[in-house]
Image (spheres, rainbow, N blue to C red):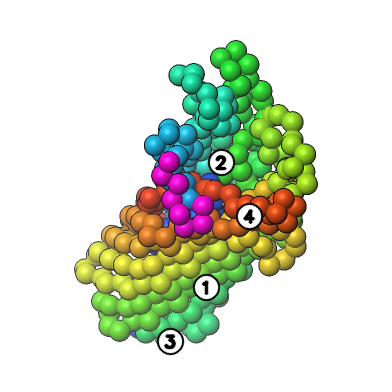
């Protein structure tokens, strides 16, 4: 009897974002995001994945309104983010599996306001800060609700995991104040390698096959981060303002994260194609624990095409989610400042137009 082979496609969708722009959606190993199912003679007991993600964020939004004047004035913040996640999955039996995820992250951030200031006329006013290293490692366990050998038409897989604060959440670089003066301080939250919290994740993968070639898929992920703040200053090596202390944005928050996907897939010989919707983001308020501290909450809704190619021992994929809606919502410090001043406050965030995800998963044994 041919057993069900789950096409995990291990798309490095996080990620967590690391981040997808200034909304810090980190790459925390939420990669067991199956987008279909295929039959195979054998299921590998071990799989090894190399999954990469790249994006450039530069378009500023307050709510869903794009701040086009930032680009016109040349004051936009530009983030370049590249991450490669190494994953190792072990199938214990037909229903249980465990996985290990470790992201390596390289981020660069270009801005004026963090250095000379947006009003500077100096040709050197735009400078960069960087962060490179290991991100937050995650360990997860997965369980099929029905034995895949007995149910090939439809199934649901549930997963739980723990995220460890292995990424440096206090990464520092130099901020230039003028041509001769620079100060060392923590880089922006959006390019930090980790968030400083020990969290736990829940996720699900589900599919329904109309035929051997055509099916539907959905999967979701939520990261709970009980820690409220990580005590890292947001002053970039400077002195924290009194207003930042009052509204709680003087230190970085440790936010929850979420992701949801839904779509249809078509297999043609060794190729597999998918078209669907993807939603990912950071909530303004965490489900567990406090929610104060600096964060840029919001979400991105994307149209997501995927193409994959499967050989006997490997699966290759390419995914390019393209943003159709971006929303930077009010944070807790925004609301506190609104109450204190009587003036409505809602911060901005820079988003990417699209993200490029690509990688390969090897069947080891």
N-term-proximal mark, 3 vs 2: 3
- Distance CA(mark 3)–CA(mark 2): 45 Å
Position in image of residue 285 (x %, y %): 66, 62
- Distance CA(mark 2)–CA(mark 1): 28 Å
Comparing marks 2 and 1, which lies closer to the viewer?
2
N-term-proximal mark, 4 vs 1: 1
Check residue 150 in the rendering and tell me which mark sits there, or answer none.
Answer: 3
Mark 3 nearby-residue class (10 Å; few <14, some 14–19, many ≥20): few
- Distance CA(mark 2)–CA(mark 4): 28 Å
Residue for badge 1: 204
Residue for badge 2: 191
N-term-proximal mark, 2 vs 4: 2
Q: In the rendered view of the protein, which quadrant contains the N terminus?
A: bottom left
Q: In the rendered view of the protein, which quadrant contains the C terminus?
A: bottom left
| Disc 4 + disc 1, Cβ < 8 Å | no
- Distance CA(mark 4)–CA(mark 3): 57 Å
Report the number of discs: 4
Q: Residue at x 53, y 82 (%)?
A: 145
Q: Residue furthest front?
A: 342
């Amino acid at each position: 009897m041919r057993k069900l082979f789950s096409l995990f496609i291990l798309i490095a969708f996080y990620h967590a974002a690391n981040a997808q722009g200034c909304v810090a959606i980190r790459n925390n190993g939420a990669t067991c995001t199956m987008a279909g199912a295929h039959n195979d003679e054998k299921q590998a007991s071990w799989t090894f994945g190399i999954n990469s993600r790249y994006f450039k964020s530069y378009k500023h939004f307050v709510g869903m309104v794009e701040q086009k004047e930032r680009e016109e004035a040349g004051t936009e913040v530009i983030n370049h983010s590249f991450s490669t996640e190494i994953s190792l999955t072990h199938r214990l039996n037909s229903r249980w599996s465990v996985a290990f995820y470790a992201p390596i992250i390289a981020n660069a951030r270009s801005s004026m306001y963090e250095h000379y200031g947006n009003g500077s006329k100096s040709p050197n006013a735009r400078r960069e800060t960087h962060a490179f290293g290991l991100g937050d490692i995650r360990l997860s366990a997965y369980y099929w609700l029905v034995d895949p050998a007995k149910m090939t038409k439809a199934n649901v897989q549930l997963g739980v995991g723990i995220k460890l604060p292995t990424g440096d959440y206090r990464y520092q670089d130099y901020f230039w104040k003028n041509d001769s003066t620079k100060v060392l301080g923590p880089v922006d939250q959006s390019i930090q390698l980790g968030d400083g919290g020990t969290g736990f994740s829940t996720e699900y993968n589900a599919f329904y096959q109309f035929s051997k070639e055509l099916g539907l898929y959905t999967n979701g992920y939520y990261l709970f981060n009980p820690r409220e703040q990580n005590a890292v200053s947001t002053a970039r090596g400077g002195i924290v303002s009194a207003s930042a202390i009052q509204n709680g944005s003087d230190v970085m928050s440790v936010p929850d994260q979420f992701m949801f996907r839904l779509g249809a897939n078509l297999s043609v010989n060794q190729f597999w194609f998918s078209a669907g919707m993807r939603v990912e983001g950071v909530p303004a308020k965490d489900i567990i624990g406090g929610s104060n501290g600096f964060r840029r909450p919001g979400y991105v809704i994307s149209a997501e095409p995927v193409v994959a190619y499967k050989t006997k021992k490997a699966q290759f994929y390419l995914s390019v989610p393209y943003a159709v809606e971006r929303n930077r919502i009010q944070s807790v410090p925004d609301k506190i400042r609104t109450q204190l001043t009587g003036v409505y406050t809602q911060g901005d965030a820079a988003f990417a137009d699209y993200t490029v995800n690509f990688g390969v998963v090897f069947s080891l044994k």
